[in-house]
Image: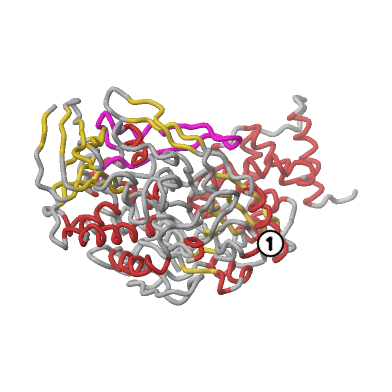
Amino acid sequence: MTSMTGHDVRRRRFIQLIGCAAGAAFAGCRPARELSEEIADLLELRDEERAWLATLPEDDLRRLFAGLTAPDVSADAAARVIAQLLRPRARLSAFVRYPAIGDLRVVCDGLIRE
Amino acid sequence: MASSASDHDICVVGSGIAAMMFAERVMARGRRVLMLERGREYTFADRLRRGSHDDPLPFNRSDQRLRHGTRGIGPYLFNPVYNLGGSTNHFYGNTPRFHPAHFEMGAFGGLDRAWPVTYAALEPYYLAAERRLQVSGSSVRTPFPGRFDYPLPPHRPSPSDAACEAIFGVAAVMPVPTVRPSAPVGGRPQCCASDHCNLCPIDSKGTALNTVYPAIRGKVELRSGLLATEIHVRGRRVDGVTVVDREGKRSRVTARHVVVAANGVDSCLLLQRSDGVPKHPTLGRGYMDHPAFELAIYGTGLDTRPGYGSSAQTGMITTFFERTAEALPVSLLGEIRFADPLNLTHVREPVAADVARLALRSRYSSAATVRARFEEIWRSTLYLKFLVETQPLMENTVSIGEIRPSGQAIPAIALQLPAYFRDCRRHVQEVIQARLPRATVKHMVTRPGVHHWMGATRMADSPRDGSVDGHLRYHGLDNLSVLSASTFPSCSSANPTLTLCALALRLGDHLATS
């Protein structure tokens, strides 16, 4: 039996998801929670960041997963979801591994002073 | 109507930074000044507590964001601060000078845009204004020769500034002259880089309230909560100003000289609604604001680190500041907006989407994971904003749209983007693209204006060409002056505040000695 690479697994998963998105309720459709975990892994989200995904509706999770696994096809939609995911300033800052920054309105560390 | 007899030498309508600097200057020469302010005396603590500068008096409806049609570019917002201290309460704090050539350049597009005052005549007042406002800046790294003596050193350049030096050359990146202090000064702390200049959380940014007002408080007679609705004229002289209070009660104040020092739109409206004031052909015409375009540059290959910096903005690009530079007919001043992609939601979201798209497609980064690619591309993204000098087109106008029962005049503003605007944008994009051939230079936003209200009571030697003369005296009236950016006959691409402050000091000297 030919072994599958991680890429192959994701591609097969992507094909399944396309089917789900089209309304085909076949057995391969996994629940959103499982999808979130895969996305969190693909985005390398830290434990404390994984909760960000809970704010996304299931359709967006599918778009994001599709973009992460087949970017040639679905990058635009997935990019919009990533931007939405990183909309809060603190999330974007954390995602690009900036040092922690404060709330603009209440403390004076709005920018990152070297 | 009640009449308020006055023994004041000068009545100033408005209490913005220029009005206060003017008042301080003439009071130092023994003149007695009455200052009329339509808003109230909110302290800085009041503003922080309320989280707003808005004034609830019935004739101060600035919170509604008046919308005016502009040709093809969406709504134009006129949203002044109507209370003590005026617009410096919420401005960003950049205080560059105009380029000397911007006072001298002659006709362009059929209209004379030369000033009846030269840079050389204004330079001592620039120096004095910079000292008074405790401006941070570099006396060496400026785009033109001249005398500079900034009282505070410039802010430390941000990584994005250094990236711009690599693109445009070191000489073309100027540390921004700003009233956001680079060190503690005058009881104010160093700028904390909150990038929340609209309501500085620590009252660090220099404003009318925390620089000049403490020096004139108790010396100037301030009457707040009074809206000036008409200037009365007899012969060649102003003999009174009608004011209305919140209950609608009208009264009249007098002084030997009247200085209209409201913002660049309301100054014009007051003159227009005053029957006795001569209506010169250019009154309300030649209105200008700085249209602006914003560019995101991805894949610079440089360490730009959006979000890192010691003040809200620390550098400006002067490559296009001289009108003749880079074959442009007008002046452009670039702001290196390294803070915006991190701090402003309307910038952050589209930039993040672009970076994500590039990261998903593995452009500009060969890192193994999406997150690593996103981080690498993000940290090399540059965000620039260019202010464009506007031609003083006579079809760009300010007029009275409506007089409300409260007495407030609502402006009708007609404004169009100059024909060359898109050419300027294209040219800048091409220059950047040529210097960064691998990068993606993307136009993000066009703004019809940036709250720089200029030109509607323009300055000229003749009443045929302007409303006020070179000393800001209203043509045809011996004792009326206008102290507002509305007097600018052309607008450079530099922020107008410092030039207005220099004019305020010069007017103070002129009236105190004449």
- Read off the chain for label 1: B
Determine the main secondary structure of the stretch shown in magenta.
Answer: loop
Task: Say which of B225 and B411 sits in front.
Answer: B411
Relative to B476, residue B437 above or below: below
The quadrant in which residue B376 appears is bottom right
B67 within the magenta span = yes
Q: Which residue is drawn at 12% across and 54% down?
A: B219
The quadrant in which residue A18 appears is top right
Q: Which residue is drawn at 30% across and 33% down?
A: B274
Looking at the picture, the colour scheme in use is secondary structure
What x and y, as percent, mark residue B305? 55, 63
- Range covered by the magenta-colored residues: B55-84
Q: Is residue B265 visible?
A: yes
Relative placement, left or right, of A29 versus A87 is right
Task: Say which of B147 and B374 sits in front.
Answer: B147
**Residue topped by disc 1:** B431
